[in-house]
Each structure stands twice: as structure tokens, then as C-alpha cells.
Amino acid sequence: MEEPRTAVRFPGTGRRTSTSRSERTNLPGEVVAGEDYRDALIVYRLATRLTGQPEDGRDDAGGAAA
């Protein structure tokens, strides 16, 4: 069995930094296909922030410039 390929994409433009983290409870380091796991919990956190200047025609708050 092949491991799934995953990807996270953010639409739009602009430079950004991102980080993600997951916490797994009641699961082994490597899960086995076809195995039943009970009372498993996965908490996934994803954070991203823009690091560049606002785009032309936009103000700092993300609205249209006057």
C-alpha cells in the first residue's frame, strides 16, 4: 500500500510563512492499513501569515485603497 500524498495550498497572492502541527492520541507512530484503532484523536493546527507588503490598490486592512 502506498502512502497518500498530501498538500496544503493557499489561494491568492503574496508572500507568507506557514506552520502546521498535529497531535495524535491513542495511535502508534506508524499506523497499519486495515488495523482498527479505537478512541483515536488527531488535532491539526495550521497557521499562516502574510509577510509582504499589501498589493497595489489595497490598504493595510485588506480593503480597497481610497
Image (cartoon, grey):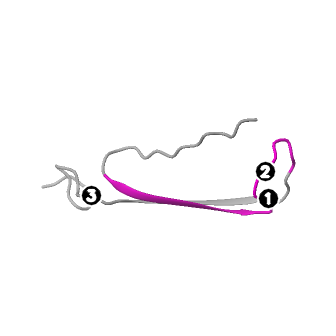
Location of residue 18 in the rendering, given as x and y in whole percent from the top left corner: 44, 58
Q: Which mark is residue 28?
A: 1
Q: Which mark is residue 52?
A: 3
The answer to whether residue 40 of the structure is visible from this angle is: yes
Q: Are marks 2 and 3 in contact (CB under 8 Å)?
A: no
Q: CA distance from mark 1 to mark 3?
A: 40 Å
Q: Amino acid at mark 1?
A: Pro
**Residue drawn 80% across the image and 62% down it:** 26
**Residue drawn 24% across the image and 55% down it:** 63
**Residue drawn 76% across the image and 35% down it:** 1
Question: Where does the magenta region start and end?
Answer: 15-36
Q: Is residue 48 shown left or right of residue 34? A: left
Q: Are marks 1 and 2 in contact (CB under 8 Å)?
A: yes
Quadrant of the rendering where the C terminus is positioned? bottom left
- Categorize mark 1 by other alpha carbons within 10 Å: few (<14), some (14-19), many (20+): few
| Outermost residue toward the left in this view | 66
Tell me which label, 2 or 3, sits earlier in the chain.
Answer: 2
Residue bearing mark 2: 31
Q: State whether residue 2 is above or below residue 43.
A: above
Q: Could you say whether the residue bearing mark 2 is in a helix, strand or loop?
A: loop
Camera-side mark, 2 or 3: 2
The answer to whether residue 46 of the structure is visible from this angle is: no
Q: Is residue 19 magenta?
A: yes
**Residue drawn 31% across the image and 46% down it:** 13
Q: Is residue 47 magenta?
A: no
Q: Could you say whether the residue bearing mark 1 is in a helix, strand or loop?
A: loop
Q: Is residue 4 shown left or right of residue 47? A: right
Q: Could you say whether the residue bearing mark 3 is in a helix, strand or loop?
A: loop
- Categorize mark 2 by other alpha carbons within 10 Å: few (<14), some (14-19), many (20+): few
Q: Are marks 1 and 3 in contact (CB under 8 Å)?
A: no
